[in-house]
């Protein structure tokens, strides 16, 4: 797809010389990437290339989400960029659904497409690893990955300022995950979405089908409770950092 600028390619030096344009003549210039609204208008007019440019506007944010949510066991087989490629193909087929919809956030819609792909990958690859009932892997039909307490604990440890060894990090993560179960699940969801996926308050509200005021209230409450828990355990004091 087009990069940051749609620029004319320079002609080869081997090509014959042509008359240089006069100063008064219009000279094609590089055009900056259009914004989301302009690209959506272009798609409505039938510009198929605009679909790719529209996806590129949100690529990095989607990549952050996929890296966060894709199970590490699946990442050994499937690269996050492959998930984005599949998401783009689905977007290309279904973009008219968004255009005909109620006018929500495009990013939230794209995130949902990527999330559905992640759920499919988890179901396909993790269920294939089952050997007996004692080793069953829980596949979340409504969620993309493991419990939010585990996900939140993992991110807190990863962003920790203390240089722990890998084994120690795993032990810390397990203990921290159990502790974080004291925070309501919805509040843990909000913390992950706001601080690690870096969604705006409005995007979180749309994702969780809540009103913005409720999200704000629960976000503040979740932060207070998280800090209380971390301060109450000396070994986790270093996790209270710039992330919160």
Image (cartoon, rainbow, N blue to C red):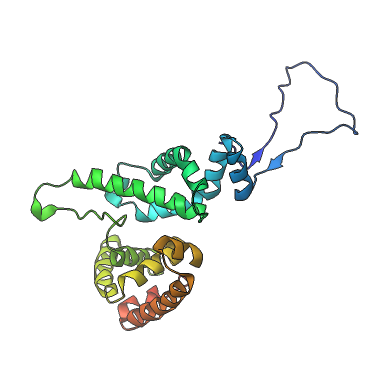
Q: At x 14% / y 47%, what residue is drawn?
A: 130
In percent of width and height, residue 27 lies at 81, 33
Tell me which corner region of the image, top left, top right, bottom left or bottom right, holds residue 43: top right
Direction from residue 197 to residue 126 in the image, left or right:
left
Q: Nearer the viewer, residue 14 or 168?
A: 14
Direction from residue 123 to residue 103 in the image, left or right:
right
Direction from residue 243 to residue 173 in the image, left or right:
left
Q: Nearer the viewer, residue 57 or 229?
A: 57
In percent of width and height, residue 155 lies at 37, 64
Q: Nearer the viewer, residue 244 or 122?
A: 122
Direction from residue 186 to residue 175 in the image, left or right:
left
Q: Nearer the viewer, residue 210 or 160?
A: 210
Q: At x 34% / y 66%, what residue is drawn?
A: 152
Q: At x 48% / y 70%, what residue is drawn?
A: 212
Tell me which corner region of the image, top left, top right, bottom left or bottom right, holds residue 15: top right
In percent of width and height, residue 189 lies at 36, 66
Number of marks in the rendered image: 0
Q: In the rendered image, which quarter contains the N terminus?
A: top right
In percent of width and height, residue 25 lies at 87, 31
Q: At x 34% / y 51%, what residue is drawn?
A: 70
Q: In the picture shown, does residue 242 fall above or below 54?
A: below
Does the image show residue 31? yes
Q: In the rendered image, which quarter contains the C terminus?
A: bottom left
Does the image show residue 160? no
């Amino acid at each position: 797809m087009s990069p940051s600028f749609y620029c004319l390619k320079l002609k080869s030096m081997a090509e014959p010389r042509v008359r240089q344009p006069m100063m008064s003549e219009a000279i094609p210039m590089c055009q900056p990437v259009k914004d989301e609204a302009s690209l959506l208008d272009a798609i409505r007019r039938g510009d198929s290339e605009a679909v790719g440019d529209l996806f590129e506007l949100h690529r990095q944010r989607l990549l952050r989400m996929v890296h966060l949510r894709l199970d590490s066991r699946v990442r050994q087989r499937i690269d996050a960029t492959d998930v984005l490629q599949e998401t783009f193909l689905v977007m290309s087929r279904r973009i008219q659904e968004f255009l005909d919809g109620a006018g929500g956030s495009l990013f939230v819609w794209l995130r949902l497409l990527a999330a559905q792909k992640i759920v499919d990958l988890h179901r396909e690859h993790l269920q294939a690893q089952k050997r007996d009932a004692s080793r069953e892997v829980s596949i979340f039909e409504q969620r993309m990955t493991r419990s939010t307490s585990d996900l939140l604990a993992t991110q807190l440890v990863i962003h920790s300022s203390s240089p722990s060894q890998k084994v120690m990090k795993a032990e810390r993560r397990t203990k921290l995950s159990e502790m974080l179960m004291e925070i309501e699940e919805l509040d843990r969801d909000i913390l992950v979405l706001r601080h690690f996926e870096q969604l705006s308050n409005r995007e979180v509200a749309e994702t969780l089908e809540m009103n913005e005021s409720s999200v704000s209230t629960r976000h503040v409450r979740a932060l207070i409770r998280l800090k209380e828990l971390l301060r109450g355990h000396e070994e986790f004091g270093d996790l209270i950092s710039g992330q919160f």
